[in-house]
Amino acid sequence: MSDLPTTPAKIGPTQLTEYLHKSGHLPAGRVAAVESDIVGTGKMGENARFTLTYEGAEGDPPASVIGKFPAADETARAMASSLGAYYNEVMFYRELAAGTPMKTPEIYWSGISDDRTQFLLLMEDLAPAEPGSQLVGESRHHAARALGEAARLASAYYGNESLADRDHVMSPARDDGGRLGQTFLEGAWPGFVERFGDHVSAECLTFAERYVANHTHFVMSYEGPRTLVHGDFRSENILFGSDTATTVDWQTVSEAGPLTDAAYFMGGSVEIDDRREWERELIEEYREHLARGGVTLSAPDCWDLYRESAMHGLMITILGASFSTPDPRGDRMFLAMIQRHLQHCVDLHAGDFLP
């Protein structure tokens, strides 16, 4: 597919009318006017809210939609394209979202260019639900709700071997044993330490260096049934309503162990002291959610998987910071994340799972 609008400024009434007609959300009539505002703080994509005025509309077309476009930042856009992130997200919504009871936004229209470097998603506007903030740790209520959603995803695809046949589901363990990630981490680590090392304890830095040196071991060490995971399951990728939590931003959808998303959320989206206080109880609740979805883990096995999976957050944070252009808010976010994730690993003795 070609001629996709690549920025919010390049989409107007004519294109929106066409997309909503094709998807059946605007059976008749047209979009007469559009107002747009940038929303969110995503690093690998740009989001805008389009408020729509119709002429002659039939049915119940949406009053507003969210459009997701390639990242405005050139560095982030190039990295996302090279990793297939845009293709992964479009295909998740087309082929996998319906297979899980996890709450995700309705997609009105999606498109991906032939070379997979450009994409467009038009999706449900979930306002007044709002994303969390990595700069402010989540409440226990939000953490419990998020982990309940993660468990629904993990249980829905647990042990599903068909994931291995999908080219839009990343699987380092199957693909290359984590060697590409190892190369990226070793290349990114010196610059990451230069940016953030002065604000991280010596104990945590020592652990991080050990992890970076042994990333492939971490990738290959889990031998149990794998499942579909979000891969970047943090508070800013979850829209919290009064009684809902809707997960967005599926660019890192992967095949991994069933505690991956839960450990990542607890390690990076909850303040350290709160996480220490809540995690035993919340992970036991998570295990119970899995059981209701047909996945049975003993309490000791679940806890050990949680401990080991804590290291997933290091890779995402180090590479995420290294492949995006620095900015004040982004630097504060990545610093908060690496401090939390590293302390998480140290607190849980995740080094027990490394050589």
Image (cartoon, rainbow, N blue to C red):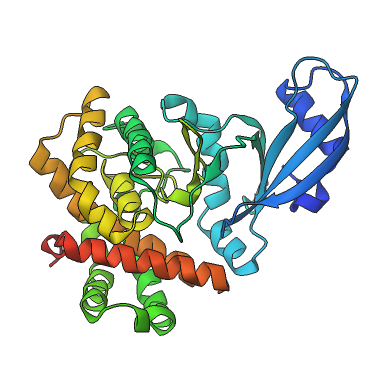
Q: Position of residue 318 (x, y in %)?
A: 40, 68
Residue located at (61% from left, 52% from top): 40
Residue 134 lies, with reference to residue 150, above or below; the image says below
Residue at 76% across, 41% down: 50
Residue 231: x and y in percent read 39, 49
Residue 323 seen from this side: no
Quadrant of the image containing the C terminus: bottom left
**Apparent side of residue 343 relative to residue 104 in the rendered image (left or right):** left
Q: Is residue 271 left or right of residue 48?
A: left
Q: Is residue 218 above or below residue 30?
A: below
The x and y percentages for residue 277 are 21, 52
Q: Is residue 120 in sight in this rendering?
A: yes
Write the residue at 41% across / 44% down. 230
Residue at image location 85% in from the left, 42% down from the top: 12
Can you name the residue that lies furthest to the top here?
59
The picture places residue 352, in percent across and down from the top left corner, at 11, 62
In which quarter of the view is residue 121 placed? top right
Residue 200, above or below 99: below
Q: Nearer the viewer, residue 263 or 18?
A: 263
